[in-house]
Image (cartoon, rainbow, N blue to C red):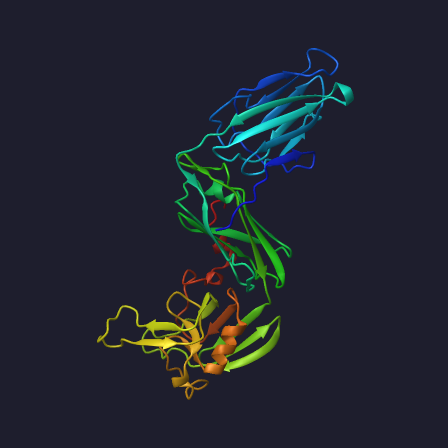
Amino acid sequence: MAKGRFGPVVAVGTGAVALLVTGCSIGGEGKLASGGSDSTVTITPANGTAQVKPDGTIEVKASGAKLRNVTVQGGGAAISGGYGDGRKTWRSTRTLTPGTSYTVTAQAGEGGKARTATSTFTTLKPAETLSIADVTPNLSGEKVGVGMPIFVRFDRPVTDKAAVERTLHVTAEKPVEGAWRWVGSDQVIYRTKTYWQPHQTVRFRADLAGVNAGGGVYGAKDAKATISIGAAQITTGDIGDHHMTVTRDGKKLRTIPFSAGNGETREFTTTSGVHLLMEKGNPVTMTSPGRQEGDPGYYKTVVNYAVRFSNSGEYVHAAPWSVGSQGSANVSHGCLNVSPANAKWFYDTMQRGDVIDLTGTDREVEWDNGWSVWQLSFDKWRQGSALR
C-alpha cells in the first residue's frame, strides 16, 4: 500500500493552496499588545477543545493588527491554509487527521508589538476509518507501459464516493486528460483519454486523512505513489494472419509468428480488441476452466515465459509443440502460442501496461476482462466517475 508523507510542522504563507472544507467550533481569544488593549486574536477550535470533527476548519481572526504568521503543528497530514481580508483572517484548506492533537500558533502585529496566541485541540477518533489498501502499479523500480491505468483499492466499501474521489489527484510530467471510474464499492480506476506519453514520471496523491467518507467513517491517512512510464511498446496482431509486430517508441522491434485459439468454441477463440499486458509467470500451469480431470476437453499444461493479457486465461507463452503451426494455423485453446525463443524475448522485453491490440475474430474482449479498459470510449469511461 502507498503510504502518506507526514509533516509535523507546517508554516503557512500567502502562497498556500485554497480548497474548501466545512465545520466549525467555539473559538478562544488572546490579547495582543499591538497598539491598544482591545486588540485580539481568535483561534477556532479554542484551546482545550476535544472531539473536533476531522472535516472541520481551523480559523484564525485578528482585530487591531494583521496576522503575521500562522503555523499548525501536529501528527498526520500537513495542514495548509490561506490568508484573507487583508491578512486579518486565516483558514485551513484541508481536512484534519482523526485522533490527533494539533497546536495552532498565530502571530500578529509588527516588531516589538508582535504577540503570539496559541490553541491546542484534539480531533475525533472515529470508530471506523477508511484507508487505501493498495495502489497498482506501485512496485519499486518498475517501468510500466503507456496504456497503464491506476488502480486504487480501499480497505472497506466507500459510501460517499464523490467526497473520496475529490481527494484523489494524478499529476504527470507530460499531462494528459484522465478520469476515475468506480468498478465496485471499494475500487476506483484512473484512465487517461489517450495513452500516456512515454518516458515520464506520474505521481498519485490521496488527501484522504479526515475526509468524511459517509456513514460516520473518516479517512485515516493520506497516501501516495510514484509511477514510472517506460517506452511506448505496442504490439499489434492479426489473428487471421497469425503474426504480431512489436514496436518501441514507433520503431519496429520484431515480428513474431503465432498460433492463436482454434475457434472451435467461444472459449477457444482468442479475443480481439485492445488488451494490456498484466503479469508474467515462468512457469505457469494452464488448466481448462470449469472442467475436471476426465471431462471432455480437460487439459493441464505447464508453460514457460507466459505473459498474461486477460482474465479469461489468455497469455503469450512458449509452445514448442505447435511451432509447425505458428504463422500458418490457429490450433491453441485461446492463448498466443509462440516459439520458446520468441516467448523468452517477449517475456524479457515487455512491461506491465504495454498495449497488445489484436484483430481478426468476432469475440471482442470485454472492457472489464482483465485490464482491457481501452475497450470503452473515454466518454463512456468517465460516466463511471462519482463527480460526473
Q: Would you say 60 lies left or right of 136 here?
A: right
Q: Quadrant of residue 370?
A: bottom left
Residue at 52% over, 47% down = 3
**Identity of the residue furthest to the left in this view:** 294
Residue 152, image x and y in percent?
47, 51
**Identity of the residue furthest to the right in this view:** 111
In this view, 383 is above or below 37: below
In this view, 325 is above or below 44: below
In this view, 29 is above or below 176: above
Q: Of 196 and 129, which appears nearest the observer? A: 129
* Residue 14 seen in the figure: yes
* Residue 80 seen in the figure: no
Q: How many marks?
A: 0
**Identity of the residue furthest to the bottom in this view:** 324
Residue 158, image x and y in percent?
41, 43
Q: Of 125 and 362, which appears nearest the observer? A: 125
In this view, 28 is above or below 260: above
Q: Would you say 36 lies left or right of 308 here?
A: right
Residue at 54% over, 58% down = 140
Residue 341, image x and y in percent?
49, 82
